[in-house]
Amino acid sequence: MSDYLKQRFEADVELVPGGGGVFEISVDGRLVFSKRELGRFPTEDEIAGLGSA
């Protein structure tokens, strides 16, 4: 996933180790996707629109 984000958005991507199945995407410090809240991973199509959400 981080490679996709780096290539698609030329983004600085940081993997932060965690536990409990937490997977979140933040853009400029703003949470834009939370697996914990939705109970699933995002699709690549969803990720494409997250920065403008």
Image (spheres, rainbow, N blue to C red):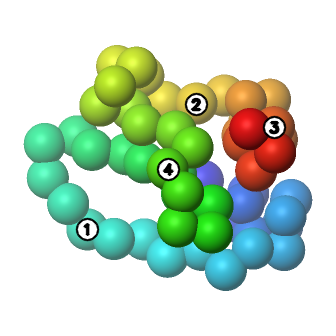
Answer with mark 1 or mark 3, whichever residue precedes in sequence: 1
Q: Percent x, y for residue 23?
A: 37, 45
Residue 6 visible, this angle: yes
Task: Say the numbered circle drawn on residue 31.
Answer: 4
Answer with mark 2 or mark 4, whichever residue precedes in sequence: 4
Q: Percent x, y for residue 45?
A: 80, 29
- Badge 2 density bin: few <14, some 14–19, many ≥20, Cα 10 Å: some
Q: Are marks 4 and 1 in contact (CB under 8 Å)?
A: no
* Amino acid type, label 2: Pro
Q: Is residue 15 above or below residue 24?
A: below
Res. 38 image quadrant: top left
Q: Are marks 2 and 4 in contact (CB under 8 Å)?
A: no
SS under mark 4: strand
Q: How many angstroms separate mark 3 from mark 4 (CA)?
A: 13 Å
Q: Percent x, y for residue 42?
A: 58, 30
Task: Name the residue carrying label 1.
Answer: 17
Q: How many angstroms separate mark 1 from mark 2 (CA)?
A: 18 Å
Residue 2 visible, this angle: no
SS under mark 3: helix
Answer with mark 2 or mark 3, whichever residue precedes in sequence: 2
- Badge 1 density bin: few <14, some 14–19, many ≥20, Cα 10 Å: few
Q: How many angstroms separate mark 2 from mark 3 (CA)?
A: 11 Å
Task: Name the residue carrying label 3.
Answer: 49
Q: How many angstroms separate mark 2 from mark 4 (CA)?
A: 13 Å
- The residue at 39%/32% (across/down) is 35
* Amino acid type, label 4: Leu
- The residue at 86%/59% (across/down) is 8
Task: Say the numbered circle drawn on residue 42.
Answer: 2
Q: Percent x, y for residue 43?
A: 66, 28
As rendered, which of 19 and 36 lies closer to the eye?
Answer: 36
Answer with mark 3 or mark 4, whichever residue precedes in sequence: 4
